[in-house]
Amino acid sequence: TDRTFTMLKPDSVEKGHIGAILEKITAAGFKISAMKLTQMTTADAKEFYAIHKERPFFGELVEYMTRGPIVAAILEKENAVEDFRTLIGATNPADAAEGTIRKLYAASIGENAVHGSDSDENAAIEGAFHFAGREIF
Ligand code: GTP
Ligand code: MG
């Protein structure tokens, strides 16, 4: 079975959307293999999003992702990476399909409620970034 990595971003935690978003995730057939409330430091966010470091929104992204706690989780399901990206919807909620998590809970492209890994390789890297082996079930 495949795994993906997700974060319920600071806006989701601030707005009290943790429960509703987790309900959507489990109802879609994902099993939770690891989960915790945590907060990224500036150094963490810069490393996690290093691929975007030349983009004009990088500073804003790091500010956003570090401003409060997130829920980090590893999710298990067949075809996990692709199916989770479908469940969350487009990066910009204005373009996200009806019923997707970003359509329902994201405010803007900059504050878009959730993260989902974009490949199996990145899912493994991102899961290991946030969790020790003994925290993964
Ligand atoms: P993630 O699952 O969070 O990686 O989102 P994504 O894969 O749908 O988008 P991408 O990896 O291209 O961008 C990473 C994150 O940067 C997005 O989820 C947004 O939070 C942020 N971001 C992307 N584009 C913009 C933008 O134009 N402006 C701002 N402020 N933030 C952006
Ligand atoms: Mg991405």
Image: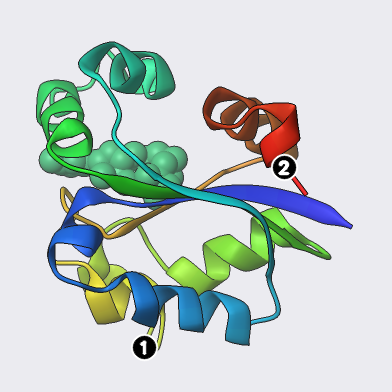
Q: Residue furthest right?
A: 1
Q: Nearer the viewer, residue 77 or 41?
A: 41
Image-quarter location of ligand 1: top left
Q: Position of residue 41 (x, y in %)?
A: 25, 20
| Residue occupied by mark 1 | 98
**Alpha carbon of mark 2 to alpha carbon of mark 1: how far?**
32 Å
Could you tell me if the residues under marks 2 and 1 are in contact, i.e. CB atoms within 8 Å? no
Label drawn at residue 40: none
Q: Is residue 73 in view from this perspective?
A: no
In the picture shown, does residue 108 fall above or below 118? Answer: below
Q: Position of residue 3 (x, y in %)?
A: 74, 51
Q: Is residue 113 above or below residue 47?
A: below
Q: Give the number of the disc on residue 136.
A: 2
Which quarter of the image is occupied by the N terminus? bottom right
Which sits earlier in the primary sequence, circle 2 or circle 1?
1
Q: Is residue 73 above or below residue 47?
A: below
Residue 27 picture quarter: bottom right
Front of the two marks 2 and 1: 2
Tell me which amino acid carries mark 1: Glu
Tag 2: amino acid: Ile
Residue 134 in the image: state x and y as whole percent: 74, 33
Q: Residue at x 73, y 40 (%)?
A: 120
Dot 1: what SS? Answer: loop
Query: Going by the image, does 112 lie left or right of 4?
Result: left
Who is closer to the viewer here, 54 or 71? Answer: 71
| Residue 109 percent location from the top left of the image | 19, 54
Of helix, strand and loop, which one carries label 2?
loop
**Residue at point 21% right, 50% down?**
10
Does any portion of residue 34 appear in the rendered image?
Answer: yes
How many neighbours does mark 1 have within 10 angstroms: few (below 14), some (14-19), or many (20 or more)? Answer: few
Identified at 29% across, 11% down, the residue is 43
